[in-house]
Image (tube, grey):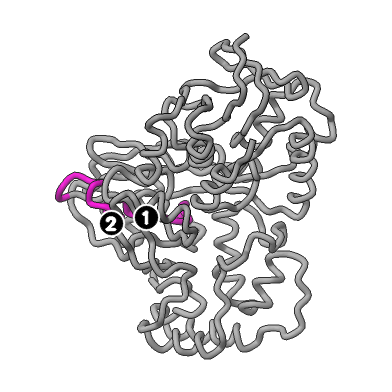
């Protein structure tokens, strides 16, 4: 058994940040054959796709310096929404101009009839208080079923922050009369590397690090400070930093207390199926990324890698990646080939592309996409964290912290590590 003074588990953006901050002195063990985690990408016949959309809007001065050292393209956050044949600017709540007039009236009335007596016990209550019954039921509650794969009553409100804009009635009225509305997105500028995909923002940090690929953790003893990987290699250590998903690291621990095992089992997350499509010509997509509310259309969100950077597509061509979310309790319901057919037919319904435009299609699944903020999540997370903290495991990253972290926030959880 080999001894290491300290070990990092997981070579995603937080693990890379931790290794960099600790002066590239620690081995980083990564289960996959590439580093990057959710911020990685893949290329097929000249078409590059990130693992979901990924744009940086950080205001963190440290991350801005790290990312800003890489040439980037600045995008204005001009997202769109699609619902039942109509397109509207994002966010819909103060940009309903693209909808038929009778729908705009219903949205306005929804806001005017909002309750002034808040009784907020769950996300649905927050939505109804913020937007009124009709708007909430027609838009964010439907989207919740597609993106979070549950009902809005099953979610707490602790994740919302500034992610959901709450307009005044004046903004709602203005946005129903014109599409010349100001930006109310939570960022004014979205940045993306000019070349190399999103991971190019932190590749230069990984150049001198000891990243050991194809090391999937299968056995972990935090009491005696030992671990074993799927390839048979065994290590002892003095300190460990982990970005592994909490349920995965707990599963690897023999004789873990039952209360901790049970708490880890109750930490729910979504998985995502990425249907990535390369088109043989340039297609005029309505925006770099867009949200889809129709529950008959499988994907909740889609984006165009070629609009993020021309480096992501061969010249004269274009691409889309569609995100379909699912959980063990709400499975996809389609085999991959059937899902491809469903996605392509949906693009035709939306007048975005025809099947004859398609040059290639790739389907791949990401087990851990987003943390689900169920009502007991924080309590169960605390139980797991307290056990790992007690045994000196430092948790970083979205799934080590088990939180709704953007890439810059995940980066900082690693960068701020102190041994």
Q: Nearer the viewer, residue 408 or 88?
A: 408
Does 311 lie within the magenta span? yes
Q: Is residue 345 above or below residue 20?
A: below
Residue 82 in picture, x, y percent from top left: 42, 66
Residue 304 in picture, x, y percent from top left: 32, 54
Does 406 lie within the magenta span? no
Direction from residue 389 to residue 232 in the image, left or right: left
Direction from residue 357 to residue 18 in the image, left or right: right
Q: Nearer the viewer, residue 338 or 198?
A: 198
Q: Residue drawn 44% across and 43% down? A: 39
Q: Is residue 326 visible?
A: no
Q: Nearer the viewer, residue 374 or 141?
A: 374
Residue 308 in picture, x, y percent from top left: 30, 55
- Quarter holding the C terminus is top right
Q: Secondary structure at mark 2?
A: helix
Say which quarter of the image contains residue 106: bottom right
Q: Are marks 1 and 2 in contact (CB under 8 Å)?
A: yes
Q: Is residue 23 above or below residue 169?
A: above
Q: Which residues are magenta?
A: 297-316
Rendered image: mark on residue 307: 2
Q: Residue drawn 49% across and 63% down? A: 293
Say which quarter of the image contains residue 402: top right
Residue 1 in picture, x, y percent from top left: 62, 9
Q: Residue drawn 40% across and 73% down? A: 89
Q: How many marks?
A: 2
Say which quarter of the image contains residue 117: bottom right
Mark 1 lies on residue: 303
């Amino acid at each position: 058994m080999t001894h290491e003074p300290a070990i990092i588990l997981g070579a995603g953006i937080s693990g890379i940040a931790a290794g960099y901050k600790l002066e590239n002195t620690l081995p980083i063990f990564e289960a996959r054959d590439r580093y990057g985690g959710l911020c990685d990408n893949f290329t097929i016949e000249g078409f590059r796709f990130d693992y979901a959309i990924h744009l940086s809007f950080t205001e963190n001065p440290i991350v801005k310096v790290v990312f800003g050292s890489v040439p980037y393209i600045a995008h204005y956050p001009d997202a769109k929404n699609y619902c039942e044949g109509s397109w509207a600017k994002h966010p819909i709540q103060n940009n309903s101009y693209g909808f038929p007039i009778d729908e705009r009236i219903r949205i306005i009335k929804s806001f005017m009839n909002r309750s002034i007596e808040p009784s907020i016990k769950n996300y649905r209550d927050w939505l109804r208080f913020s937007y009124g019954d009709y708007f909430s039921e027609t838009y964010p509650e439907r989207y919740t079923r597609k993106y979070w794969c549950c009902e809005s009553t099953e979610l707490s409100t602790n994740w919302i922050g500034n992610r959901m804009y709450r307009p005044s009635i004046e903004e709602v009225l203005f946005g129903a009369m014109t599409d010349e509305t100001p930006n109310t997105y939570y960022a004014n500028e979205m940045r993306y590397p000019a070349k190399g995909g999103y991971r190019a923002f932190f590749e230069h940090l990984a150049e001198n690090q000891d990243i050991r690929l194809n090391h999937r953790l299968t056995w972990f003893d935090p009491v005696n400070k030992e671990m074993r990987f799927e390839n048979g290699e065994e290590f002892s250590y003095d300190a460990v930093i982990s970005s592994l998903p909490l349920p995965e690291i707990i599963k690897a621990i023999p004789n873990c207390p039952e209360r901790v095992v049970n708490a880890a089992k109750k930490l729910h997350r979504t998985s995502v199926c990425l249907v990535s499509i390369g088109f043989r010509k340039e297609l005029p997509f309505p925006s770099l990324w867009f949200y889809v509310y129709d529950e008959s259309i499988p994907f909740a969100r889609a984006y165009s890698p070629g609009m993020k950077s021309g480096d992501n597509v061969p010249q004269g061509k274009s691409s889309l990646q569609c995100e379909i979310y699912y959980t063990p309790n709400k499975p996809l319901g389609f085999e991959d080939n059937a899902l491809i057919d469903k996605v392509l037919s949906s693009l035709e319904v939306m007048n975005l592309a025809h099947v004859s435009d398609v040059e290639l299609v790739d389907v791949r699944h990401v087990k851990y996409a987003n943390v689900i903020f169920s009502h007991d999540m924080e309590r169960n997370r605390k139980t797991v964290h307290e056990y790992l903290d007690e045994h000196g495991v430092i948790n970083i990253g979205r799934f080590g912290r088990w939180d709704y972290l953007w890439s810059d926030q995940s980066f900082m959880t690693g960068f701020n590590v102190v041994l």
